[in-house]
Structure formats: structure tokens, C-alpha cells
Image (cartoon, rainbow, N blue to C red):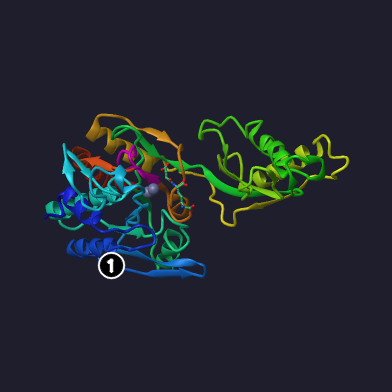
Amino acid sequence: MTLTNPSDVLSALIRCPSVTPEEGGALETLERFLSELGFTVERPVFSEDGTPDIENLYARLGNDGPHLMFAGHTDVVPTGNLEGWSHDPFGAEVADGMLYGRGAVDMKGGIACFLAALARLTGDKGALPGSISFLITGDEEGPAINGTVKLLEHAAKKGESWDAALVGEPTNPNQLGDMIKIGRRGSLSAKLTVSGTQGHVAYPHLADNPLRVANALAAALLDPPLDAGNERFPASNLELTSIDTGNPATNVIPGSVDVTFNIRFNDGWSAETLSAEIENRLRQAADALPDRATRGPARYDISFQQRPSPSFLTRDDALIGTLSGAVKSVTGRMPELSTTGGTSDARFIKDYCPVVEFGLVGKTMHMTDECVALSDLETLTQIYERFIVDWFQAQEGRV
Ligand SMILES: N[C@@H](CCC[C@H](NC(=O)CCC(=O)O)C(=O)O)C(=O)O
Ligand SMILES: [Zn+2]
Ligand SMILES: [Zn+2]
């Protein structure tokens, strides 16, 4: 195997079953590869009550600035139904020009391409005109508590600082060159509990069905829409994720119901203003309920997630321009600058340096038969190579 070949690197990583929170040998493999390239590697483990211990990796090549960070994760989501896979999810099998395996695109593939790009650059041209770091967690797909956020704090405490960061998440919807992510919407989850009075379905006047109230309150959450979006971000969106009474019987009115939902919000909101809006909508909907004269006011409780994700937007035009230029020069396509989709660990990195995201095609991420075209691995490696060279050159121009 050779480190300049991204499919060799990716195959080795896919063969490590690193389903969150298991390290699965993936960080160990990466450490070996990075050490071969001359990186100084650290493997801190972070812990917190109520969460699994998580292994992480921070590696640096070079001692001087400018300093570019590549960030990502080696943990992967579970395989799901094994019968849905036509290839071993940890076998790294190749068929018809596609490399199969969990993490192929999300995002061991991105890591493999960046590592191969560096192996080519350091092999061809020797020392870098600055430093490059890998900031890699084993806790992106999980609670994200013992991962990137703590790794950044840990490295910064030791005196590390960065001029820019590239996250290698799969940002392209259909083909390489489609899309760069320059920001992310925020994420806020919540649970609404509505209490009623349990009873017999044939005697509803003796009970107080919480589902009737929950139905009205949920409708008020969904309509009107939170906003229409703006030139920077798509519209904010509230999705119901569960309505659960825990009631297995068909002839019992349940005593209470939990309604859970998640909101993806743009930069018109903060978690605080959004929580206030939700509380306000619930209050108004509860006050407007008909037929509560005999049963009294609706009884409900709303609780919001402890650690919501903020929205963010990268405003470093030079960084975005360098990445877009690298994508265009290799693929011939000018990528869309987007803030669509989910959130990512870039939400933590943005507190330390400007951050942009570009990786593989995300079509099969989290699915059975996750796979990547071998040709995409080669193209992304060339894009990363171009980006690294151009970024360091642009830094010289800045001095
Ligand atoms: N589990 C973590 C973080 C969840 C992050 C997740 N991101 C994606 O699925 C990426 C998809 C994309 O790039 O559009 C999400 O948005 O839920 C946590 O909850 O902290
Ligand atoms: Zn990912
Ligand atoms: Zn993922």
C-alpha cells in the first residue's frame, strides 16, 4: 500500500469497525500513517459523566505559521440492516469502480484524500511553508461531547492556534464540485409533555385526553413557518420527531403524551429567541383551546436541549475563494456556496478560526451500501492538493 493512493488509505480505515463510540483501530491506523509522514501525533481521551470515553487524535507537521487545520471524524454510524448491504460494511470491497464500506464518504474518505494529498506534496516538494494539523475525533456521530469541542480546547491550552480550517465532511449532493459549505444552521431539540387524565375510551367525558391538547399545540408549533430564510441561509424548519404516549391499549385514553421535535434555525434566531417563540406559541395555543371550561387550563411542560448548536457563517472571502478556486481548477465547476443540510463540528471550530467544508459526494452517507467512486477519491485528492498549495501561497501574499 502507498500513502499517496487515497483508496489504499481509505481501505485500511474502512477495515477498522469504528462505530461510535468504538475507536475500532481507526485512529491507531491514522496515527501510523501520519507518523510515517513526519507528523507529531497525540491521542487524548476525553470523558464526562454519563457519556462513553472517547479517543481523539491531534497531529501536527511543521512548527511555524501559517497553520492550516484539517478536521473530521473517524467514527461511523452503525451499519443498520446487514441484509441491505451487498458488500461487507467493513470489508472495503471494490466493485465496478466503487469502493464500499461504512465511512466511505462520511468521512473516512475525506481523511484518506487529505492524507494522500499531503503524502504527494511532502514527497514531491519536501517541507511545507508552514504547518498542517489533523484534528480528528471519534465522537462526531454520537453526542459530540467528548470530541472536537474538547480537542480544540485541549490543543489551544497547549498553545496551538490556527489560521484556517477545512472540514472534510461530504458536502457534494450529486457530483464533486457541486457545493462548499460556508456555514451551518443551528439545531435545537425539545420535548413537550402534555398531561391529561387517563380513562376509558368509551367514557371520554370522565377523562381528559392529552392527545387532543397535544394536537393543537403541535399544530401551533408547525404553523406559521418560523421564517422564509434569507440570502445567507435557508428557512428555519421545525420537524416533529416523535409523539409518544407509551399506551399499548386501544381502549384506554392515555394519561400523558410526549411530543419531541427538532428545529434547524438560521441566523435570524438564537437558541434563546427561538425558545421564547416556542413558549409563546404554546401559551397562545393553550389559551385558545375550546371546551376547557370543565377540565381547567391545559397542563403542559416544555424542556429544551441543554447544548443547542448555534448557527454560523464563515465570512472569510479569501479562504472561500481559495477553496472554490481549487475545486474549479480541478473539476472545471464553480461550487455553490451553501449553508444547507445538517450541522457539523465546524460549529465548534468557528470559535478558533475561519472554517470551510468540502468533501466527497454525500448521497450514500448513513445508508446501507455506503460507497465512493474510486475516481472521486483521486479527484478529491487533487482538489485538496491544489487547495493546500494555493492556501499557503495566499498566506505569503497576506504578509
Ligand atoms: N450527533 C451530533 C451531531 C449531529 C450532526 C448531524 N450532522 C449531519 O448529519 C451532517 C449532514 C450534513 O452534512 O448535512 C446533524 O445535523 O444532526 C450532535 O447532536 O451533537
Ligand atoms: Zn460526518
Ligand atoms: Zn454522518
Left or right of 354 in this view: 279: right
Question: Which of the 4 image quarters holds residue 98?
Answer: top left
Left or right of 76 in this view: 4: left
Start-end of magenta stretch:
356-367
Counting from the top left corner in percent of width and height, residue 308 is at 56, 52
In front: 352, or 56? 56
Q: What secondary structure prevails in the magenta region?
A: loop
Q: Is residue 61 something that shows in the picture?
A: no
Look at the image and say whether residue 364 sits in the magenta stretch. Answer: yes
Identify the amino acid type marked 1: Val
Counting from the top left corner in percent of width and height, residue 38 is at 20, 64
In front: 126, or 233? 233
Counting from the top left corner in percent of width and height, residue 274 is at 65, 44
Q: Which residue is mark 1?
A: 41
Residue 78, placed above or below residue 210: below
Residue 317, placed above or below residue 109: above
The quadrant of the picture occupied by the N terminus is bottom left
Look at the image and say whether residue 168 sits in the magenta stretch. Answer: no
